[in-house]
Image (tube, grey):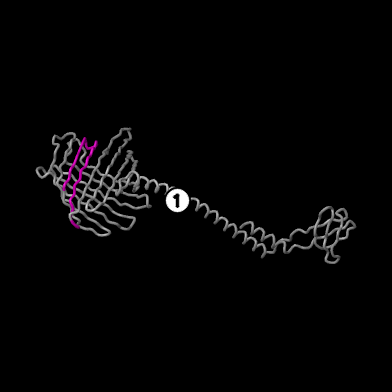
Amino acid sequence: MLRLTTLFASLLICASVSADTLVLKNGDRISGTLTSKENGVITFQSDLLGQLTIPESDATVEMPAPPAPSPAEAAAVANATTAAAVTEEATDKESISKQKQEEVDAVTKSIKDTQNWIHENIIPEGWSGKLSFGFRYLESNTETTGVNFDLNGKKDAAPHHYAYDIYYQYSRQTQTNGGVNKNQDQYGAEFDYDYDINDWMFFNASASYLRNQVKDIRHQADLDLGLGFHVIETDDMTLDLIPAYTLQYKDAEGISQKWYNLATLKEEFVYHFSEIVRFEQTAFGSVEPSDTQNYQYGFTAALISKLAEWVEASIAYELTYDNTVGTGGVKREQQIIVGIGVPY
């Protein structure tokens, strides 16, 4: 585009150039147009004398300098040149933007191809889920860092519904004097099964395992059996309540009792604000009827946003309290987790 504009400017100037001048050895000057100069011969076209052929040794030709363009011509050339430069710059930016988009598309395609390969070759048929990773860092008079890993999945084959969750959570705090305190170090797994009895009632069974070194829980295993109810079930919102019986085994520092028979109430709530944003919340409470001092409860709330087809971002709050741990153990834990999840 810029070359075309330069040619246009040249033609515009040449249109106003004056005639050539043939200067003879005797000093005579003839006005006209130089036709050619080759093989030592000048061919010159004069308006008055016609075509002249003269040896180069007997004459020279003066070529007039191009006159300065008029203000209007200069403005036209400047505007055309500026427009061409802007167009060329826009074209370059568009080309760079297109190249960057192609690179992003290539990375996205690679991730999606990997997800599809995992789903087709590793994940059992009918299952779906998400791999999540969270990291947190806080620096003030102390330095706190933490990581969270979570792998969960589910399979719906009505009237049977299956789900699992495997997780690891760790955080520590570094004091100004260099001392280090672990304020979270736990891992566990849970498997959940539901069987639809009718549209609003279902049977629920779940088994879980926990090891928590901050609460001094060496081993904890739970078996829940309950009857669940779909209190609310719409396209945007679901609310389930599950009264259950819990048999719990706990091997923890500072307590002699290992087996607990607990009455439990579980609650699960999901609300979809849109196709890409949803709110998920769960809670539970358990108490031993024969000794109400043995109780536990937990609460989780998360806001999840779908950034793309292959990735989700989330921010979650978790609170747990266990009054059955020993005197030296940590009864209460709470945390805020910012994470990234990759569905599969």
Location of residue 71 with respect to 270 vertically, above or below: below
Q: Residue at point 32% right, 36% down?
A: 174
Give the image quarter of residue 92: bottom right
Residue 86 locus on image (x, y percent): 57, 58
Give the residue type that dot 1 points to.
Answer: Asp
Q: Which residues are magenta?
A: 198-225
Image quarter hosting the N terminus: bottom right
Location of residue 270 with respect to 295 vertically, above or below: below
The residue that mark 1 highlights is 105
| Magenta residues, dominant SS class | strand
Disc 1: CA contacts within 10 A as few (<14), some (14-19) or many (>=20):
few
Q: Residue at point 69% right, 59% down?
A: 10
Give the image quarter of residue 201: bottom left
Position of residue 65 in the picture relative to residue 159 (left or right):
right
Farthest residue in the right direction?
26
Give whichever of 312, 85 is nearer the camera.
Answer: 312
Is residue 159 a member of the stretch shown in magenta?
Answer: no
Farthest residue in the left direction?
290
Residue 315 locus on image (x, y percent): 31, 49
Position of residue 104 in the picture relative to residue 30 (left or right):
left
Residue 47 locus on image (x, y percent): 83, 66
Question: SS at mark 1?
Answer: helix
Residue 147 locus on image (x, y percent): 32, 41
Give whichever of 162, 314 is nearer the camera.
Answer: 162
Q: How many marks?
A: 1
Q: Residue at point 66% right, 58% down?
A: 6
Position of residue 116 in the picture relative to residue 263 (left or right):
right
Is residue 224 a member of the stretch shown in magenta?
Answer: yes
